[in-house]
Amino acid sequence: MSTSPRARRLITITAWLVGFHVLLAYGLPEGVFIGSVLVLALAYWRIGAVGAVFTSVMLVALTVFYGLALKVTGLDERIYYRPDERYASFDYARNHRVFAPNIDVVAQMPHGDLRALTTTEIAEPRRIAFRTDAAGFRNDRDYRGQRYVLVGDSFVAGTGNSHEQVLVSQLRADHGVDAYSLAYNGGDLADYAAYLRGFRARHGDDARALLFLFEGNDFETTRVRNAGWLARSGKRYYRLFADFNTYRVTMTLWKRFTRTPAAEGSGVDIMSLAGKPVAFYKPYVAVTERARLDEVAGFESVLESMRPFIDRVYFIPTKYRVYHRQVAPGTALPNAQWDYLHGLCRKHALPCTNLTGPLTRAADAALKDGELLWWRDDTHWNRAGIAVAARVVAADLKTPGSGR
């Protein structure tokens, strides 16, 4: 029985829509996804209705097999070397990234983020507790009226550290400061503004923000996310299958393949501290050595919009800056990022604390005992480094108006 041209076109379009949604289950970058669905459309137009249906059926079958294989082999869990990746999520209502809500796990972390960029034996395995609240941030419990919220990226979120070691936990346990962590990995100042904006929408404006800015990657172009309903709905649909293991694993593999330097160690410098090899991330070294920093696009306007809700801004230096005197003695570093931030803080009457001095002094003292404030295999500070920041923050909160 023959079918009409119109019916064949309808079958082909339906098959393409099936293929479109199968490709959504792979978490491909938007550009790659768009290119793939266009190629699929062209292929279906050329092979006709029967070929299109057969291809879509095969795509569905292969994707189901792929998902089952990931599950049976356990690769869908083993691929993540830290919980941060495994539990990455997105808050569509408030248009920003978060961790999955209400997570309470203990995981073995075999190494930090820099070990993935070199074969030098620098791995520091650790067992970490990873907990999130209902909003998807690393807190013991949901927000309960704390006066201060800690806003920032992975340093504040505590990447690479167990829950009892992160900043919000040390402030409470060691200094009696009950704060709330409003931080997530990566991002820039516009992301931090989004976290604060979403928090205020839920809880009002009573809490005061302590904003933490990392020298290594927070002083680049600040891009505000499109907050329009259409854009958010499109992103939500694009991530329709974000909980599928095919989506999570493929997306993770793609990021690692495209971000990991092709040449061994091309993103890492290995230097010696306390008689041990320590990794330093080359892009952060380059930022630290930058002679000057002109206006960062979008940075000041976003900072100004946050100004009414901020009590103090903290500058987190790079690992290289803190250990510079040990790894490059006799040389001097510029202070481009701090100078830029300090100038804006003065302009907008924002108290601003530079953590470089306290961290450097503590690092010098710890080295005498063979200890470090950063993980050897990571761009992030360890429990001891976080403890220094906690002491400074607690002292600032007890003596309002003090500066460093």
Image (spheres, rainbow, N blue to C red):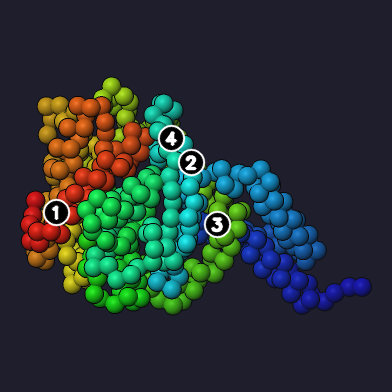
Name the residue: 30% across, 55% down: 168
Name the residue: 27% across, 40% down: 384
Q: In the displayed image of the protein, which residue is found farthest to the right? A: 1
* Residue 149 % position (x, y): 27, 64
Whole-number angstrom distance, CA of label 2 to CA of label 3: 25 Å
Q: Quadrant of residue 121?
A: top left
Of tags 1 and 3, the one toward the viewer is 1
Name the element at disc 3.
Answer: loop
Q: Earlier in the sequence, mark 3 or mark 4?
A: 3
Inspect the image, locate mark 4, and give the three-letter code of the amino acid beneath it: Pro
Name the residue: 57% across, 50% down: 250
Inspect the image, locate mark 3, and give the three-letter code of the amino acid beneath it: Gly
Whole-number angstrom distance, CA of label 1 to CA of label 4: 32 Å
Q: Earlier in the sequence, mark 1 or mark 2?
A: 2
Name the element at disc 4.
Answer: loop
Q: Quadrant of residue 334?
A: top left
Callout count: 4
Checking the image for residue 27, the label placed there is: 3
Inspect the image, locate mark 2, and give the three-letter code of the amino acid beneath it: Gln
The residue tagged 4 is 125
Q: Quadrant of residue 313?
A: bottom left
The residue tagged 2 is 108
Q: Earlier in the sequence, mark 1 or mark 4?
A: 4
Between 101 and 170, the one nearer to me in the picture: 170
